[in-house]
């Protein structure tokens, strides 16, 4: 499962009181199922940054949430994917709650021209590797 804020940085749920506009054409959630090789793909919009209240001028960087289910997992695994070059990543306590710099970098997608849909959508690669 995936979920995210819209391009204005607002989630479509009742607890999001950010005054940014809702997009009536954007649900903000979906599901992607892997193929037999474990690959997945989905097309969405790039989410916007949004304010949150851990201090007066705090903003979350653009990110997409993933909730993974599968054989061999005792419970779901939740992760977030970030976009390269976002200056808000350096200020994000959620991302920096991960002590290992290498692990943090694995949560940042990479731009991939081969995944881009010409004249429609930029492509980003975010590989999720589960061992077991």
Image (tube, rainbow, N blue to C red):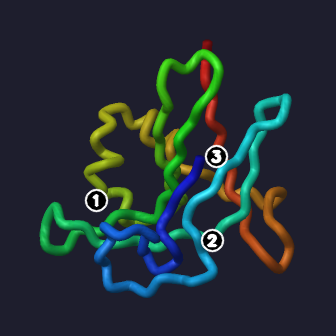
- Residue 131 % position (x, y): 61, 17
- Identify which residue is drawn at 67% across, 58% down: 111
State which mark lies toward you, 2 or 3. Answer: 2
Q: Mark 1 and mark 3: span between their CA atoms?
A: 22 Å
- Does 42 appear above or below 99? below
Numbered circle sitting on residue 101: none
Q: Residue at x 30, y 45 (%)?
A: 96
Q: Can you identify the residue that label 1 sits on? A: 91
Q: Which mark is residue 126?
A: 3
Label 1: which secondary element? helix
Please identify, in this view, whether the residue under mark 2 or under mark 1 is nearer the observer. Answer: 2
Task: Name the image quarter holding residue 54.
Answer: bottom left
Residue underneath mark 2? 45
Labels 2 & 3 near each other (Cβ < 8 A): no
Residue at 26% from the left image edge and 51% from the top image edge: 93
Tell me if residue 3 comes above or below residue 14 in the rendering: above
Q: How crowded is mark 2: few (under 14 residues within 10 Å), some or many (20 or more)?
A: few
Nearest to the observer: residue 72 or residue 131: 72
Q: In this view, does 79 lie to the left or right of 30?
A: left
Image quadrant assignment for residue 88:
bottom left
Circle 2 sits in a helix, a strand or a loop, which is it?
loop
Query: Between 84 and 42, which is closer to the camera in this rendering?
Result: 42
Question: Label 1 crowding class (10 Å Cα cut-off): few <14, some 14-19, many 20+?
Answer: few
Question: Furthest residue to the left?
Answer: 55
């Amino acid at each position: 499962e995936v979920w995210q804020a819209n391009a204005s940085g607002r989630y479509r749920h009742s607890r999001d009181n950010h005054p940014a506009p809702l997009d009536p054409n954007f649900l903000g959630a979906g599901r992607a199922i892997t193929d037999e090789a474990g690959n997945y793909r989905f097309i969405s919009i790039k989410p916007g940054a949004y304010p949150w209240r851990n201090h007066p001028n705090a903003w979350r960087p653009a990110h997409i949430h993933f909730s993974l289910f599968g054989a061999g997992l005792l419970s779901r695994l939740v992760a977030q994917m970030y976009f390269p070059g976002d200056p808000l990543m350096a200020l994000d306590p959620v991302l920096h709650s991960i002590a290992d710099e290498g692990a943090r970098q694995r949560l940042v997608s990479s731009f991939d021209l081969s995944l881009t849909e010409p004249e429609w959508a930029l492509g980003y690669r975010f590989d999720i590797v589960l061992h077991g």
